[in-house]
Image (spheres, rainbow, N blue to C red):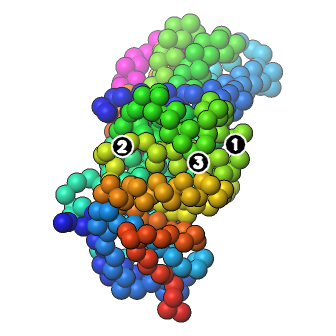
Amino acid sequence: MTPVLSAQSLRCERDERLLFDRLDLSLMPGDILHLTGPNGSGKTTLLRALVGLGQAVEGHIQWFDGQVQSNEKIWYIGHRPGVTLLQSPLENLRYALALRGLERNESSLFEALEHVGLRGYEDVPSRQLSAGQQRRVALARLFLDTPSISVWVLDEPLTALDDKAVELLKARIQAFAAAGGSVLMTSHHGMSGDAVRTLALGGAE
Amino acid sequence: MKLSRLFTRVLQRELQLAYRRRADLANPPLFFLIVVALFPLGVTPDLERLATMAAGVLWVAALLANLLSLDLLFRSDHEDGSLEQLLLASSPPTLIVLGKALAHWLVTGLPLTLMSPLLAMMLALSPAAMPLLMLSLALGTVTLSLVGGIGAALTVGLRQGGLLLTLLIMPLFVPVLIFGTAVVQAAGAGLPWSGQLALLAAMAVLALVSAPLATVAALRIAVEE
């Protein structure tokens, strides 16, 4: 089985502090790789470097053995969730799909928004929603059936969510992995399950 | 999904956002109107003297009005994280940036072009030069929107990027201004103008193919911090 992601000898130095060095990681289909570590240990920097949003990390990074254009297969949800406040949740979701070259009919979009508890808010401007609801708008894409997406890269997906939504999203992540997807995530919440592997950063101070 | 479909989606989104921010949208045309209207009051009401400087005044005012709106091109996208999503899209980000630049032209360059005959009349520009004023503004503002995108992308990460943006981008705007004014002046004086217009068109084509590449490169730097 070819790894979804393999990265070797990663190294990151910032402001003359070594965040991590000689870090190897690999991600197989069905894996959930949970990055943990104290604030400032380089979790976000690592995730961003892996998806290609920064050059702060040195090392060798390869997605899908370098055979396909990786962007088509990855959902990345960052700290700033990419929710346009002047647009409604429905418009945001549709645009997020369009950027991946995807389209879904209205009813499946409504269904995804209902899953994340945004029923009745579909056409409300996102700026009128609470912080947690705005994150849910970004997360709604994870509740769509998108066979072309095989990797989720999630930076703190569980922040600002209430307990029920945290459980819902955790279950969704587990289900995605069980169906052969791979998840790379950071979180200060614990993740449990057979598929979960934990990688701790910043322990070597 | 076909690329043309994505392009229409991007254009649709940008125009929708522009409509929802229409207070910002009104600034460039209003600025254009006020600056041009002040010239006869402040300089001279003498129509003959106004006519000689009409081309330059109209072009300078249009250029500054355009500059005024550039700072906002990527700012909100940067703040909410949409810019990261844009760079991670499965289709070339240059296409999306091109869509944004076109939307910017539709909401600034095009209104300025459409307003220009009315303001030209206030400055007693010769009627023969009117069509060329519009044509040169239409072509020139395409270049301004595209090239301005590079500057907007370079300064989007800065808190007070406005002044730096102006300094960075002004040298690139100057050739457009020179040839834009030259077209209108030549047409007003009954001289051949096709050479200047061709150069203006060449600049627009050059900007069309190269500015999106430079803009995407600048955006990659901007999202890094």
- What is the distance, in whole Å, between disc 3 and disc 2 at their CAs? 18 Å
User: In the image, which residues are magenta?
Assistant: B188-198
For mark 3, name the chain.
A
Q: Which residue is more in the foreground, A59 or B56?
A: A59
Q: Which residue is more in the foreground, B104 or A43?
A: A43
For mark 1, name the chain.
A
A194 sits to left or right of B171: left
Q: Which residue is more in the foreground, A188 or B76?
A: A188
Q: How many marks?
A: 3
Q: Write the residue at 51% across / 44% down.
A: A140
Q: Nearer the viewer, mark 1 or mark 2?
A: 2
For mark 3, what is the residue?
Answer: A136
Identify residue type, mark 2: Thr
Counting residues from the N terminus, which is met first, the one under dot 3 or under dot 2? 3
Q: Write the residue at 45% across / 58% down.
A: A173
For mark 1, what is the residue?
Answer: A129
Counting residues from the N terminus, which is met first, the one under dot 1 or under dot 2? 1
For mark 2, what is the residue?
Answer: A146
**Residue B122, labelled with which disc?**
none
Vertical position of residue B78 compared to residue B72: above or below: below
Identify residue type, mark 3: Arg
Magenta stretch: includes residue B191 = yes
For mark 2, name the chain.
A
